Image (spheres, grey):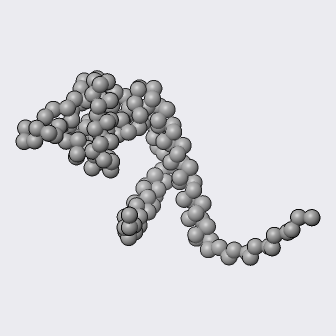
Amino acid sequence: MKAERPAAAPVVADPRLEAAMRTWFRFLRLHRRITTRAARELRAVGLSIPQFDLLSVVWEREGLSQQDVAERLYVTKGNVSGLVDRLAAADLVERRALPDDRRSYALFLTEKGREVVETGFRLQRELVAATLGDLPEGTVGELDATLVQWRDRVRALPPLDD
């Protein structure tokens, strides 16, 4: 005969917290779906999401150092270096020595790199238009305001000890 577990005490849940938890998990799943979809679309033009992110930063401001790009992407300089190696081998970016620091390089798009970035932006616009851009008027503004509030609360959290 199997022993029965004692009944768990009922959890008295805060309805606001329950709604927040539901939204949290919905947001995480949505992020995963969007990222998966964007990755598939970018693969069609031969890019990964990190590669497209790097190309986008360089497109926005050519001549940045690899360190500046790393800071904008919130990654290490080593991560950027590996990405740049692959993108340079594919003739999408070029490194140019910085005149005041011969050990550092400025990044520039090649003509082929510009074409690939423009294709990536087109794919991104199409995905946004078919999803977020198709929501009822006013909804996107409300969502944006909510995300800004959420972001600000995350930024205000005390740092974790490493």
Report which quarter residue 7 is drawn in.
bottom right
Compared with residue 73, is residue 151 higher up or lower down, i.e. above or below?
below
Q: How far across and down, in percent of the image, does residue 57 sit?
A: 28, 41
Q: Residue furthest front?
A: 1
The C terminus - image quarter: bottom left
The N terminus - image quarter: bottom right
Residue pictured at 45% horizontal, 40% vertical? 128
Instruction: Return the residue nearer the eye: 104 or 62.
Output: 104
Report which quarter residue 18 is drawn in.
bottom right
Q: How far across and down, in percent of the image, does residue 42 sit?
A: 43, 31
Residue 122 visible somewhere in the drawing: no
Q: Relative to residue 143, is residue 83 drawn left or right?
A: left
Compared with residue 46, is residue 10 higher up or lower down, i.e. above or below?
below
Residue pictured at 81% horizontal, 70% vertical? 5
Compared with residue 32, is residue 125 higher up or lower down, i.e. above or below?
above
Residue pictured at 35% horizontal, 40% vertical? 53
Report which quarter residue 94 is drawn in.
top left
Q: Residue furthest left?
A: 100
Residue 139 visible somewhere in the drawing: yes
Residue pictured at 21% horizontal, 35% vertical? 107
Q: How far across and down, in percent of the image, does residue 150 sit?
A: 44, 63
Report how many numbered discs are placed on residues in the image: 0
Q: How far across and down, in percent of the image, does residue 157 sit?
A: 40, 69
Q: Relative to residue 41, is residue 10 drawn left or right?
A: right
